[in-house]
Amino acid sequence: MEKDLVTLTIDGQKVQAPKGTTILQAAKKAGIDIPTLCFLKEINEVGDCRMCIVEVEGRRGFATSCIQTVEEGMVVHTHSPNVLEARHVILDLIISNHSKDCLTCTRSGNCELQALANKFNISTIEFEGERTKHKIDDVSPSIVRDFNKCILCRRCVSACKKVQKVGAIDCINRGFESCISTAYDKSLNDVNCTNCGQCIQACPTGALHERENINDVWPKLKDPDTYVIVQTAPAVRVALGEEFGMPIGTNVTGKMVTALKRLGFNKVFDTNTGADFTIMEEANEFIDRFKANDNLPMITSCSPGWIKYIEMNYPELLPHLSSCKSPHEMFGALLKTYYAQKENIDPKKIYVVSVMPCIAKKFERQRTEMQNDGMYDVDAVITTRELSRMIKQANIEFTSLEDTNFDSPMGEATGAAAIFGTTGGVMEAALRTAQDVLTGQDLKKIDFEQVRGEQGIKRATVNIAGKELKVVAASGLANAQKIMEEIKSGKADYQFVEIMACPGGCIMGGGQPIKNSKIRSEVDVRKLRADSLYSIDEKSVIRKSHENPVIKKVYEDFLEKPGSEIAHKLLHTKYYKREKYNI
Amino acid sequence: MKTIEEICKIREDKRKELDLRVNTQSDTREKHILVCHGTGCTSSESPKILENFRKILKEKNIENVRVIMTGCFGLCAKGPIVIIRPEDTFYAMVKPEDCEEIINTHIIEGKRVDRLLCKDIDGKIVQSLDELNFYKKQKRIALKNCGVINPEDIDEYIAFDGYKALEKVLKDMTPDEVIDEIKKSGLRGRGGAGFPTGNKWELTKAAVGEQKYVVCNADEGDPGAFMDRSILEGDPHSVLESMIIAGYAIGADKGYIYVRAEYPIAVHRFQIAIDEAREYGILGKNIFGSSMSFDVEIRLGAGAFVCGEETALLESIEGKRGQPRVKPPYPAQCGLWGKPTLINNVETFANITRIILNGAEWYSSIGTEKSKGTKVFALGGNVNNIGLVEVPMGTTLREIVYDIGGGIPNRREFKAAQTGGPSGGCIPKEHLDTPIDYESLKEIGSMMGSGGMIIMDDTKCMVSLAKFYLEFTVSESCGKCTPCRIGTKRMLEILQKLCDGKGEEMDIYRLEKLALNIQRASICGLGQSAPNPVISAMKYFREEFKEHAIDKTCRTLECKAISKIIINEEKCKGCGLCQRACPVNAIEGKDREKRVINQDKCIKCGTCLTNCPFKAIGN
């Protein structure tokens, strides 16, 4: 081990770092925080922006500290007069071609460019000049692109191309005219974008953000004739607190519910209850298909980014998809039928708002299949970030709120539903129910550790009711692609496949609080949020969906049994081959 | 497939047959009419000339006369060029309709067609190529075969020692000996940076990796430069042979040549060369019966200047957007598809076979202490003999401009020469005696570059010139890194302001600050060298920048917004010639009276200046 260490000097400090470490990492170890802008750990390490340049003695020109690795005896200066001047000039140049409208920018306060401008005290722009002008693309129901704020760091490109292997965006044109665009310079809505929103998570500025739907919701809340029901996805509760300065992964379920009540929602329900319905339907669908060996492996269908991806890229594999709608859609459908009847509310007056970690849900919501009797199952989707803004706009001191519980009767949920928010969770939840249904017993072994953890692809063989079951949980579309290729080529022998579009699952969704590059380098955000969900599961009294009393009652009173005709009408959907490019 | 013995036989037979090409005393009864088929002459209808010659010869039933297409002769200003061997008669600016007369007079009657003979700068009529001053100080190594052989006939290449170097290498030399020879020769990269070629080969050979590649950079992008194009058009096999030798030396079995698609003739001829070499078994498996295998493929570039930068070129070959990579790692360690890759430029390769055949000692005897061999320049701009020249390193700029180039036309003064194109700098009059080599050019703020050499006379505004080169880099920047993408644009905007008379003194400092930081902070050579033309122009012609920024004047007529033409009252004789010549009636004044220019009407075209017999008009 010892001999693999390299000793170098950074800003006068002797630093030891393993061979292969970048200068940036080595400096961090020594408590030196070299500024970066285009750098996004393991995703975009290209050295484009030139903010991280440092001087290395004896080397011509500057070294790119985010890429270049340490060498024995290297003497590095991270803030020599030359470096400082160059950084100033570079920052000045970047800002000179930026719209500088921080006051009206959604990322104000959480913008990496703004933070650097502040750090370097840029008060006037020395090199003002022509600015590139771009039309704002706001056609997509999920993503808005405003490239007047783009600094061409290409973090979004790498997220889309490298992490997700979608490649909906890349650089077009040359030189000063360079910009990030799509095939044929079309709107994001008309190309192979899956709306996963990983680009938004990667963007250091406000060039990419969600299509905001807050202003659809506010008027409904004030309208006495509208019965506004809100439901929140599992991943929201372990991330919302971050928007209020709480540690990453803090479980703020109680405060979130209180805040939603204060905002004026008539009912605050839990999408987890919807997730329990999903498990009932999906586990039973799986059992039927497993017994009949029909279209195996069965692939989960909760992730709308994934659904659009498979519709565009693997239409021939669509029969493998579970026909289940995603939890919030199932739940929305039940709210406007079962719940409306029960509470004697005109379903037309019900307005369902879903708070989601996901921006693809905004696209999913408006799919024509997601309606019943001419009514959409869900009327608005807002993200974790948007909810935090609503709470702030309503002058609510979030951190000092008391905890309250979700409303009854549609607020009870199981631990199985909670872990839907992380990769492997849907699989685990479904297996818990499937094994009980198949054995007719109440089994105690319900943790499936094999499908937990950080890996993008988790393969496991589980024993269910005496039968060997091969399963795989993949998150991130690049990993999904690998599994699809295995299935397509006939090499796969799985019976059950879980796919989540976002790497790490919903907790890392495009609608979650955005963590800057520095945090993403230093902290495993995914793990902190996932651990919090597993802890909710562990503490739950009921941890299997089929044991949820609400579920039992709704099946007794209304849905009859999983897979019934009415269940199919309300809780299942269809998929269609979709063209990648709408030209 | 041919064996070594068969190739030797071809060489022997063909060499005899082609003796008249290089030997004016050849006692053959044959004549060869050589018609230049470089890009320049081709666009001036040289294929038609060739066709006409053949047609007329056939009609007249003349035997023993062959019409041959060749590569570029170099003196492009006089094209299309036709040379008749063995007597070496040089006909300039030949038109398709002149063929009949040439055949009748020269071939049949045995007399020269005087009107088509070339006049040298001193007015002397030149009978043959060797008499031209243009050629006297040149030494042709890289261009040795250009204008001598038919580039589309491998046998002609073989006749002049073609594939003999490869044979020697495979039979008698180890890879290390080859590398050693190149190192000893002192050859340095001709693409611009001047990295020692042998060291590059050594590094690539030493790099760990099963698969290695040889890449030839033929993405010649400097405006006005056409050295590499001419080599590929005139002698493609020499590059191909050298690539195979490089493959042998570093242990690669695959080569790529990256040529810009705007060079269709070069691409076409190189493809023919590849096909011919494959047919002869010179490319492919077990070359010349050895254990060595090598093949070459052409990759077309879409004309982006940045793709001449080696790492951007590699990205482009890989099918990606042509953008540079951060170095280190260098291509020698991590190149094409992450494999160790040797990248050399066309002209560098063109020297290899000659070094192998004639020895490192011979090669290193040419040139200066640190810059060995010759360098090809594309001479252009305000110089009489525009064309391609190859001179030993250490030749002075004065010799190139005046002896080879024939001086400045229209009796104007030499002002500066730009070498290294948009990445280089200008050399002013006071440095005319600078020997042209890597170090000397760098010392005076320019660079060798790939070989573009643009001569400027005193009508050129240096601020405009700096702006011209920046316009080029701005439009050719790939947009990857900030300093180059936005910084060069800002520099251009400042220069535009200066030319429009809207600048201020601070702009000069802003330019300097930007230039320095773009040089230091850009990722690749394009960005790092983009400010060079501005920096060197400011170094040698700072006064002009000040005039533009502070006085808002331009001493030439280029910056129309701020230049002014005035008639010197004392010198004006009132002849009125200027008034008559002015296209916009901007000159006022009655007969025999002194004339005045109405500045509101004047469009600064300069017509009056050239028409004044008393030199009374100036700016």
Image (cartoon, coloured by chain):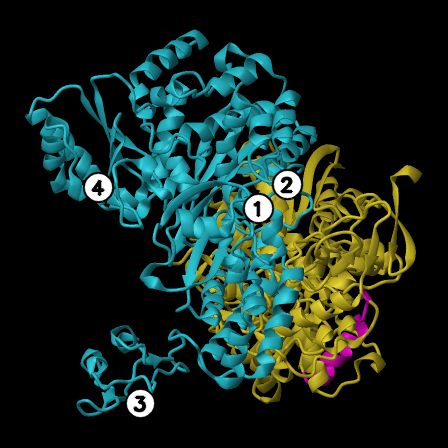
Chain colours: A yellow, B cyan
Label 1 near label 3: C-beta < 8 Å? no
- Sequence-first tag of 2 and 1: 2
Query: Magenta stretch containing residue A260, yes or no?
Result: yes
Residue where numbered disc 4 is placed: B117
- Predominant SS of the magenta segment: helix
The disc at residue B370 is 2
Whether pointer 4 and pointer 2 mark residues with C-beta atoms closer than 8 Å, the reply is no
The chain holding disc 2 is B
Identify residue for label 3. Answer: B600
Report the residue marked by disc 1.
B437
Residue segment shown in magenta: A248-264
Quarter of the rendering containing residue B275: top left
CA distance separating discs 3 and 1 = 49 Å
x and y percentages locating residue B343 in the rendered image: 56, 37
Say whether disc 3 or disc 1 marks the residue closer to the N-terminus: 1
Specify which label sits upstream in the sequence, 3 or 2: 2
Q: Residue furthest left?
A: B59
Nearer to us of marks 4 and 2 is 4
Look at the numbered discs 2 and 1 and tell me whether their residues touch, using CB distance below 8 Å. yes
Q: Say which of A30 and A513 sits in front.
A: A30
One can see residue A538 in this view:
no
Judge if badges 4 and 1 mark residues of a common chain: yes
Q: B501 above or below A455?
A: below
The reply to whether dot 4 and dot 1 touch (C-beta < 8 Å) is no
Q: Earlier in the sequence, mark 4 or mark 2?
A: 4
